[in-house]
Image (cartoon, rainbow, N blue to C red):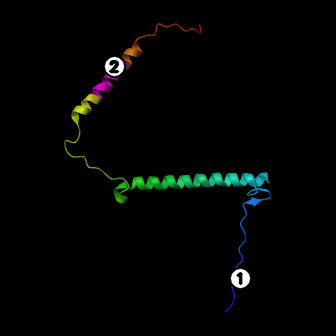
Amino acid sequence: MTKINLNFKKVSLMRGGSFLGWGQSAHRDWKIILSGFILAIIFSLLFSFLVFKQINNAGDSGFLQNETVQNGALDTTLLKKIILYYDDQAKKFEKIKSNKSTLSDPSI
């Protein structure tokens, strides 16, 4: 039998008297910041693309469940109330637009 000798290097987070050697070299610090920023952008783009693909293929994967609308499921009375509300809002807006303000400008 042979004896296997494994040597593990001790991991030290304190390098050069500071955490991970931060502040020892400005060039290295900027490389770390820039590479971290680029990695964050790449991961966010990858995640966005994967979510887009899941939503785009919703019928295949079942990511979003398609709900079927039954006949008569649309509440017509509620729809009429909503349409009347927005018609009233449009009339109020036109009334406000047509009335000129009688207030004078204090900066003149």
Q: Please state which amino acid type lies under the numbered disc 1.
A: Asn
Residue 7 located within the stretch drawn in magenta: no
**Quarter of the view holding residue 57:** bottom left
Q: Which residues are magenta?
A: 83-92
Return the residue at label 1. 5
Front disc: 1 or 2 = 1
- Residue 103's spot in the image, x, y percent? 49, 8
User: SS for tag 1?
Assistant: loop
User: SS for tag 2?
Assistant: helix
Return the residue at label 2. 91
Q: Quadrant of the C terminus?
A: top right
Above or below: residue 70 compared with residue 82: below
Q: What residue is rendered at 71% in x and 82% in y? A: 5
- Residue 74's spot in the image, x, y percent? 23, 39
Above or below: residue 6 compared with residue 102: below
Q: What residue is rendered at 71% in x and 66% in y? A: 11
- Residue 86's spot in the image, x, y percent? 32, 26
